[in-house]
Image: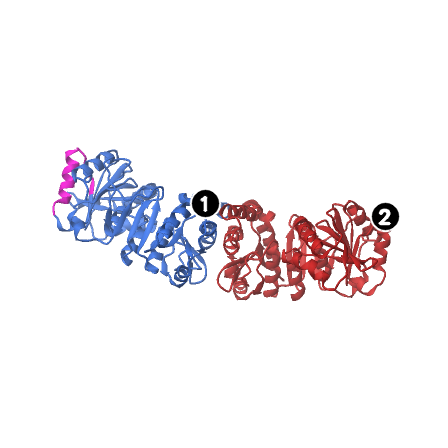
Chain colours: A red, B blue
C-alpha cells in the first residue's frame, strides 16, 4: 500500500495500443492496493514534429510560443491515457501543468520548477482517481506555459513525487536499469541493484543517458527513491537512493565514457597574470562550456594551455582561440576532435587512497596514453585517444572487478 | 483606425504556407493603421483526427478528457501563427482559452461562455502585440478546459469582439458572403450586401451554413457588426447588422431549404386530452427534436397527427411512434424521408400581409404540393416533396424578385 509516481516515456505511449499496455501495467499496481500517479511524455517523434513546424514558421522560434506549441504533445497523451483508464473501468483524470499546478520561473524551453502545490493531485487520489500528469511542462507566474527542457518528464515525475510525499518514483524506460558501464561495448557490464544519488549524478553527467541530471538532483534534494526499470518487462531495475554505509565499501561503482568533447591546446602562451581570463572570456561569451583545463609550464616565461570543449562547439571555439592566440602572442593553436573522456565513479574513493593510481596503471598496462586528468571527490576522469575508448572501458571494468556482485 | 477581430477557419490555417498567407492579410490591416485581434480554428482535419484517437482509447470518450485533447488543435495554430507574425517583423502573442481567459460553464464539448475579462487582450494590443486567440475553447470555473461545440471559433470571435468593444468582427470563410439562396442550385442567387441579425438567425437555423447560430445570437445581443467574407480574395462580403428602417422595405431577403428532416404521420388518433403528451414525451425522452406539428381533425372523435423529426433520427422515431400508436389505439403510422423544407425569410413580412399567400401561390403554379406549413414573424416554411426542392427554390427566388439589388 504505497504511493507511487510512475513515469512512462514517448515510446511507451507512441500510439493507442501502447497506451493500453501502460494502462494495464498501472492497473496491476492498483490491484495490489497501491495509489499511482502517472506522468507521461509526448508520443515519440511528436515533439520533434512540432519543433520542425515551428521552424517552418519562424527561423528561430520565439521561446514562449515554442512552449505553447510543443506542450500540446503531452496534452494529447495524458487525455488519451485517462480515457483508456476509464474504458478499463478505472476513474482517471488528466492534469496539465497549469492544472496541477507546476509553477516555474519564466525561462521558456528550460524552465525551473518553483513550487508544486499538492492539493489537486491529492484530492484526485482521495476521490479514487488515477491522476495523469503532463510531463515536461509547467506554468509561469505570468500565466504562460513553460517547458522544462529535454528529459523534462523525468524531472516532472521526481518533482511531483517529492511534492506529494510519494514513497517512490518509478522511471519506466527502454533499458533494464543502471549498468556498471555501457553493455553495448562491454559484455561483462552488470546491472546495479542500487546506486547513490551522487554516483548517479556523475554517471548522468558523463553521458550514461538513463536519467536526466536535473531529476537526479531533485531526487537527492528531496530524498525521493527512484526506481529505474524497463517498461517492457517486470524485472527489478536499479534503485537510486541515499548513500548508506555499505555503499562506501565499494571503491568503484561504474565506468563511464564520453565522446562528446574535443581538445584545444594553445602553445607557448606568455605566462602573465590575467592571461587565462583573456583566453576564456571570449569563449564563455560565445556560450561555449569549457570542461577540463590544464596548464603546463615550459622553460622561460611560457606555458602551454590545454582545455576541452563540447565537440559540437569545436569549430567555433577554434576560430575564437586562434584570434585570441594572435592577440596575446602565443606561438600556435592545435586541436583534436578524436578524444574520449573515460571516468571511474564510486563513493568509496572518498576514504580510500590509490584508486586514481590504480586507474592510471591499468590504462598504462594496456598501452593507453593519458592526455589529461581531472578528479572530483567520487570520480576520476582521463582524456585519451578516442580509438582506445572500448579498450579502456573494458580494461577498467575488469581491473576494478565490476562484473562481480556488490 | 478601427479595432477589428478576424476569425480564420481550418482551411485557411491548414499548413504553415497558408498560415503565412493569413499573416500577410492581417499585416495589410495593420499597415492601414487598424488594431487586429486574430481568432483561429485548428488545422482542417485535425479535430477529426483527434476525435478518432479518442474513440480508439474509449468507446464513448469522456467529455472532460475529450476537451483536454481536442483543444490542442487550436493551440498548435495560434502559436505557429504568432511565430509567423514575428518572422514577418510584427510583435504577436498567442492566447489559450485560460489565458484570455474565456470563462465558460462546465458543459464539456458544448460549453456556454459566461465572461471574458478584456484586460489581457487589451494590454497586449496596447503594448503593440497582435493577439492571437484560440477559437473553440474556454476554461471552466473548476479550471478544466472546455470546448464550445462545432463552429465554436465563430462564437469565440464574436464574443471576443463584444468583450473588447471591437468595431467589427470579420469572419473569413470559404464563401463570398451570405446569398439570397444557395448559388449551387440557383444561378440567380445574389450576394447580399447587408442582412439583419434576425434574418441571419433564420437563415442559419435553416441550414445556410455560413455562420454558426450561436455566434449570430451573440452578435445580436451585443450589437457586434459581423462581416462574412472570403479568405481567398479581398472582395466585400456581407455585413450582418442591426436592422434599420430600410431593411423593412424588403419583403423577402432570402430563400432557404433543408433536406435534413423526415415526416411521420399517425392516422386516426383518438382525439382526447393529453394525447399529444403521450405521443411526444417518449420522443423527447429519446433526445429527438420535433420541429413542425400539424393536427388534422377527421370525422368523429378522430384526428391525424403529422410532425417532422431530423432525418437521422427517423428510424429511431418510427420505432417509438409505432409502439405509442398501438398503446393509444391509433389506426396506422406512415412516414416519409423524402421531404424538404423550403422557407422564405424577410423582416418586411412583419408589416406586410400577403407574403405567405404569394408563396403558396407560386408553389401551386409550379405544381408543387404543400404538405405542411409553419410561420414565424419573419419566416414562412413549407414542407414539400424532396424532388421539388430545386424547382421550389428557383421559383420562389424568381417570384419574389430576389435577383434584383436591394
**Residue at (85, 52) in percent of width and height:** A362
- B55 or A347, which is in the foreground? A347
Query: Where B266 sits versus B222, above or below?
Result: above
Query: Where B376 sits versus A126, above or below?
Result: above
**Residue at (47, 54) in percent of width and height:** B68
Q: Is residue B99 left or right of residue A19?
A: left
Quadrant of the image occupied by residue A211: bottom right
Say which element carries label 1. Answer: helix
**Residue at (31, 50) in percent of width and height:** B213
Q: Is residue A237 visible?
A: no
| Residue marked by disc 2 | A366
Crowd rating for badge 1 (residues with CA inside 10 Å; few <14, some 14–19, many 20+): some
Q: Is residue A326 visible?
A: yes
| Residue marked by disc 1 | B46
Name the subunit of mark 1: B
- B385 or B168, which is in the foreground? B168
How far across and how far down the image is residue A16, in percent? 54, 46
**Is circle 1 on the same chain as circle 2?**
no
Q: Is residue B174 left or right of residue B404?
A: right
How far across and how far down the image is residue A153, in percent? 59, 55
- Label 1 or label 2, whichever lies nearer to me, is 2
How far across and how far down the image is residue A204, in percent? 69, 56
- B406 or A319, which is in the foreground? A319
Over which residues does the magenta segment extend?
A: B353-372
Amino acid at each position: 500500500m504505497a504511493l507511487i509516481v510512475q513515469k512512462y516515456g514517448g515510446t511507451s505511449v507512441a500510439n493507442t495500443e501502447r497506451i493500453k499496455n501502460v494502462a494495464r501495467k498501472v492497473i496491476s499496481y492498483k490491484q495490489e492496493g497501491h495509489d499511482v500517479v502517472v506522468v507521461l511524455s509526448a508520443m515519440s517523434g511528436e515533439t520533434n514534429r512540432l519543433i520542425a513546424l515551428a521552424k517552418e514558421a519562424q527561423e528561430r522560434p520565439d521561446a514562449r510560443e515554442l512552449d505553447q506549441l510543443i506542450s500540446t504533445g503531452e496534452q494529447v497523451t495524458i487525455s488519451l491515457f485517462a480515457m483508456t483508464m476509464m474504458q478499463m473501468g478505472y476513474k482517471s483524470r488528466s492534469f496539465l501543468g497549469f492544472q496541477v499546478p507546476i509553477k516555474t520561473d519564466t525561462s521558456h524551453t528550460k524552465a525551473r520548477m518553483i513550487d508544486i502545490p499538492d492539493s489537486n493531485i491529492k484530492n484526485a487520489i482521495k476521490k479514487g482517481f488515477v491522476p495523469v500528469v503532463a510531463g515536461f511542462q509547467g506554468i509561469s507566474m505570468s500565466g504562460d506555459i513553460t517547458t522544462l527542457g529535454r528529459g523534462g518528464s523525468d524531472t516532472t515525475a521526481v518533482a511531483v513525487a517529492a511534492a506529494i510525499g510519494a514513497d517512490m518514483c518509478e522511471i519506466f524506460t527502454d533499458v533494464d536499469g543502471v549498468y556498471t558501464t555501457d553493455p553495448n561495448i562491454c559484455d561483462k557490464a552488470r546491472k546495479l541493484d542500487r546506486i547513490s544519488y551522487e554516483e548517479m549524478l556523475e554517471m548522468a553527467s558523463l553521458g550514461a543517458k538513463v536519467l536526466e541530471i536535473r531529476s537526479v538532483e531533485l531526487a537527492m534534494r528531496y530524498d525521493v527513491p527512484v526506481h529505474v526499470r524497463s517498461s517492457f518487462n517486470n524485472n527489478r531495475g536499479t534503485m537510486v537512493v541515499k548513500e548508506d554505509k555499505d555503499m562506501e565499501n565499494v571503491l568503484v561503482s561504474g565506468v563511464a565514457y564520453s565522446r562528446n568533447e574535443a581538445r584545444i591546446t594553445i602553445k607557448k602562451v606568455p605566462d602573465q597574470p590575467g592571461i587565462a581570463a583573456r583566453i576564456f572570456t571570449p569563449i564563455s561569451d560565445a556560450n561555449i562550456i569549457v570542461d577540463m583545463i590544464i596548464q603546463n609550464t615550459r622553460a622561460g616565461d611560457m606555458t602551454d594551455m590545454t582545455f576541452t570543449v563540447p565537440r559540437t562547439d569545436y569549430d567555433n571555439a577554434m576560430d575564437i582561440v586562434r584570434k585570441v592566440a594572435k592577440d596575446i602572442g602565443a606561438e600556435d593553436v592545435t586541436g583534436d576532435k578524436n578524444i574520449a573522456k573515460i571516468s571511474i565513479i564510486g563513493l568509496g574513493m572518498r576514504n580510500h587512497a590509490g584508486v586514481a593510481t590504480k586507474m592510471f596503471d591499468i590504462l598504462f598496462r594496456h598501452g593507453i596514453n593519458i592526455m589529461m586528468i581531472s578528479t572530483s571527490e567520487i570520480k576520476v576522469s582521463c582524456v585519451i585517444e578516442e580509438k582506445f575508448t572500448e579498450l579502456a572501458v573494458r580494461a577498467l571494468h575488469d581491473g576494478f572487478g565490476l562484473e562481480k556482485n556488490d
